[in-house]
Image: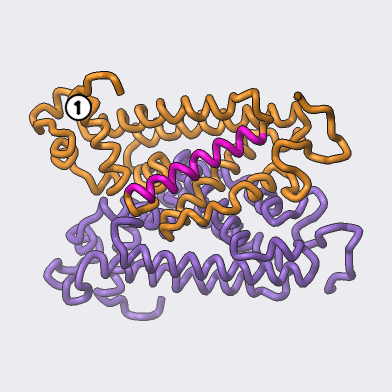
Chain colours: A purple, B orange
Amino acid sequence: MGRTSTGKDRLVDAAHELIYTHGYGGVGVADICARAGVLKGSFYHFFASKQALALAVVDAYWCRQRDEWVQLLGDEKQPPLQRLRNLLAANVAAQVLDKCATGSVRGCLLGNLALELSGQDQPVQSRLDEVFVEQIRLVYGVLVAAVDVDAIRPEFATLATARAVLAQLEGLVLFAKLTNDPAVFDDLWPQTLRLLGVAADTTDASGPRRRASARPRRA
Amino acid sequence: MGRTSTGKDRLVDAAHELIYTHGYGGVGVADICARAGVLKGSFYHFFASKQALALAVVDAYWCRQRDEWVQLLGDEKQPPLQRLRNLLAANVAAQVLDKCATGSVRGCLLGNLALELSGQDQPVQSRLDEVFVEQIRLVYGVLVAAVDVDAIRPEFATLATARAVLAQLEGLVLFAKLTNDPAVFDDLWPQTLRLLGVAADTTDASGPRRRASARPRRA
């Protein structure tokens, strides 16, 4: 916003929207140029290939998303598990809003591309792998913070548990997309708490792991 | 095995293999015919469209898989949670074997198609939805059996929990495919136990939920 949209930006935005809706294989360079209002002859001035554009789409998308992830997971005014809950809620809200706007749960752009292109396109697969490693590390960071306030046990502050949390999200996104129904996310938070070894019925997510171990909280 | 392979069967087998490797959008009718050794002109004698063939691929695949799911989850010689563990282990073993054979973790054919075609192809999406509903119901059945032997608490024998178990599997399949590394499944069973409200360190999966509530087991 507030900047002049260049042909390159418009190509990235158009490719994002079309790939999100139709998948990478379902979209051609001509479709992307038409939506972006860029002449097909100019496409190769900006990008060497459709693959190069796909990499730019992933980078632009994750650049925005990472800011949100860092902000939500680093919000020290909130207890660590509440930050994780807010991150998951933001992801679910995005699916709900997108369905309102388009009529379809389109799922996770990165997850869609990961399943479609892994084994097919090494550069895109590698970039997606890097992005998911970053996501796992960000969630891992909040799990470590949760241990510090006794909200989860130390053995659950691992990269494997962080990946399990994101796997549960991506797996439910698959079911939400398949059924076109965001209601499948209704139990995501209690399911996530269980993955973290926290009994949902003994915590409000911001509270301590065991009532017996409750400490004075910040005001 | 033991039967004469027809052109129709060969088309289904070829389409399965090619779609599993390259995705639905990455494969054309000509590729499928070439692999099946069927003249392209004969294709439409067997199938009205590539979509019709995709439906046949899903049906043939799930027909075989369902037999395995029913057998493993219905094996009354095993305690219910051990049956579920065996099902998950069979799915993981299939990924490991496939990587040995092809060099790639190709993931879950049905999950791949669900993400690629949901919102794109209503008949295939509907058929996949039916298959996953069946999978969820089969897992739900074993959760009910687990309650009967006091292996999980009644509040966890729900369709939502059964879906969460499969979501964890599908989510980890995504990570295994992305990283081409089946090691991401290493913690699947303890993660599944936690989703079921069972502390992994107080059960061997075949044992009771709480040692204090142990009952005599079948010999």
Can residue A100 be seen in this snapshot?
A: no
Disc 1 chain ID = B
- Give the main secondary structure of the magenta stretch: helix
**What residue do we see at 35% from left, 27% from top?**
B60
> Residue A66's x, y, as percent?
50, 71
The image shows residue B141 at horizontal and vertical percentages of 62, 27
Q: Residue at x 56, y 48 (%)?
A: B168
Secondary structure at badge 1 equals loop
Q: Is B94 rendered above or below residue A58?
A: above
Pick the residue in front: B83 or A34. Answer: B83
Picture residue at 22% right of the left edge, 45% below the top: B27
Location of mark 1 (residue): B48
In terms of depth relative to the viewer, which is nearer, A80 or A147?
A147
- Quadrant occupied by the N terminus of chain A: bottom left
Residue B39: which quarter of the image?
A: top left
Q: Position of residue A180 (x, y in %)?
A: 46, 41
Farthest-out residue, right: A212
Asked if residue B127 is among those painted magenta in the image, a careful observer would answer: no
Number of marks: 1
Quadrant of the image occupied by residue B59? top left
Residue shown at 34%/47% (left/top)? B101
Q: Which residues are magenta?
A: B81-101
Reply above or below: A206 against B69: below
Q: Amino acid at mark 1?
A: Ala
